[in-house]
Image (cartoon, grey):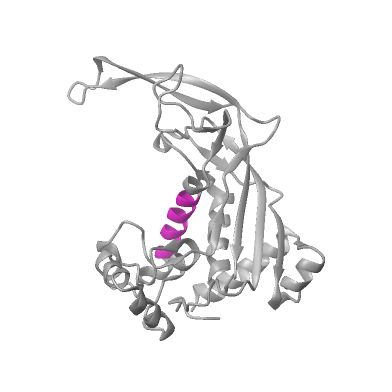
Amino acid sequence: MSNTNVIVVTDTFLRLKSRYSIRFEAEGEGAMRVGSGLEGDNTDAALVRQSDKVFIPGSSLKGVIRSTVERLARSIWAERTCVLFAEEANVGVPCGNATRKRQQELEANTGTMLEELRQEKVQLCPVCVLFGSPLMAGRLKVKDASLVEGHEGRAVVRHGVGIDRDTGTAKDKIKYDYELLEDRPVFSIELQLENVGEMDLALLFMLFSEWKREGLSVGGKRSSGMGKLTFPEEGAAVSYFDEDAGWGLIEMLESDVKAMEWKLFEQKMKDSFSVAARS
């Protein structure tokens, strides 16, 4: 098991050594507001849609997942992991992505950056390795989450008014509306992880543990209790190939990916976390 101060070398994506796909259906608990940033035909703020169907963009979902993992990782490993967009909090973190100044120094000369990576002079923290940084792409991919047929929920428009900060009452002529998704919509979610390392599994264990206990809030108006996605009690479907597990790329191409029971994968993640948390 490597130290939590992960060193990233340049061959991270030169070879495809493993791929794990994690698929499950997450149910919305309460109303959800995943906005498009555009007006709709009947509302000031429409839901985001693709081919007229509501979905959660993978980038939005990945952002929420990253912020959840950042908070948990920082609570355990203190100043050994980055927090995105919190440069002051990252001072002293041994990661090339920790401060904008360091990023600019490396980005100014790609050749220097690559050479420093080869010589292991540049480190990336476990969070940046998993989710990505301006210096290197992440190992985790999050696909767009589509609605499950028969469980699409119901799109409704709610109305609101602006509040006068002095009086605490409704302000005249400031009325607005926004579109929500209600009636417990269910989204199909898929996470894909390539060239998985022990720290990647440890971080995923933290994510799914928190998701199972507290849910994951996505979209707007989360402070009002909207957007909570629950993790299914039965867990997720896991498929993979992994040369370290005796079923590599050749076996996958000749046959297919292998399936792994959720409980076994969960234990695999937990084992990695238990070691990392005490290192």
Q: Where, by quadrant of the figure, is residue 159 drawn? A: top left
Image position of 86 (left or right of 222): left
Q: Where, by quadrant of the figure, is residue 77 drawn? A: bottom left
- The image shows a total of numbered marks equal to 0
**Most frequent secondary structure within the magenta stretch:** helix
Instruction: Please identify the residue farthest to the left as the structure is shown.
Output: 166
Q: Which residues are magenta?
A: 62-74
Image position of 8 (left or right of 166): right
Q: Observer-nearest residue: 50 or 63?
A: 50
Whole-percent x, y for residue 216 in the image: 52, 46
Residue visible at 64% across and 73% down?
Answer: 17
| 184 over 72 or under it: above or below | above
Image position of 70 (left or right of 23): left
Q: Observer-nearest residue: 151 or 68?
A: 151
Whole-percent x, y for residue 258 in the image: 77, 64
Whole-percent x, y for residue 19 in the image: 65, 65
